[in-house]
Image (cartoon, rainbow, N blue to C red):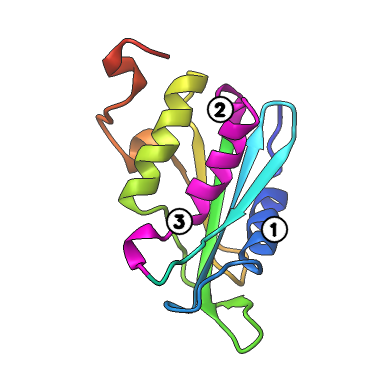
Amino acid sequence: MTMDETALIDAARRAARHAHAPYSRFAVGAAVLLTDGTVVTGANFENASYGLTLCAETVALGTVSAQGRLRDVAAIAVIGGAMDQDGAPTGSSLVSPCGRCRQIINEAAQMSGTDLPVLCGAAEGDAVRRYTLSELLPDAFGPRDLGFA
């Protein structure tokens, strides 16, 4: 299946507009492409108890898992930026998954048996950096190490 990177980044941008980020005022959106072309999105969901905050990638992949489709993940895109007065993300700096999210993405990658493409974009502009998960998280620990996948 051919991946439309622009469409996936755009889906992540739309998702970021729904971020619940009253504390950091930094909106993040993620879009997960499944093997059948379905796109599942997520936005960061902050909590007053900061440690309970959910990243956009975790929200999206949790939704994919709840649908029983973790093995169907084909790619993921993430964008982010400071929120304007209306809550829309702004800025041209590229955003990449945090360490925790890289580990969560690795779960899907190992379950699907692929080195997932991870597209990192900005809230605004055309710049996109394409990685494979193994570039972002070399020598990752995951399901294979426990005899799964």
User: Horizontal placement of 13 versus 62: left or right?
Assistant: right
Q: Is residue 108 magenta?
A: no
* Residue under the image location 52 percent in, 61 percent down: 44
Identity, as a three-letter code, of the amino acid under mark 2:
Leu
Above or below residue 101? Residue 25 is: below
Q: Quadrant of residue 69?
A: top right
Per the image, the residue denoted by label 1 is 10
Q: CA distance from mark 1 to mark 2?
A: 22 Å
Task: Let me know if residue 133 appears in the view.
Answer: yes
Of all residues, the one furthest to the top in this rendering is 147
Disc 2 versus disc 3: nearer the observer? 3
* Residue under the image location 60 percent in, 40 percent down: 63
Mark 2 lies on a secondary structure that is helix
Task: Please identify the quadrant where the N terminus is shown.
Answer: top right
Task: Let me know if residue 128 appears in the view.
Answer: no
Q: CA distance from mark 3 to mark 1?
A: 21 Å
| Mark linked to residue 70 | 2
Identity, as a three-letter code, of the amino acid under mark 1:
Asp
Q: What secondary structure prevails in the magenta region?
A: helix
Give the magenta-colored segment's residue range: 49-73
Q: Quadrant of residue 9?
A: bottom right
- Residue 146, percent from left and from top: 28, 15
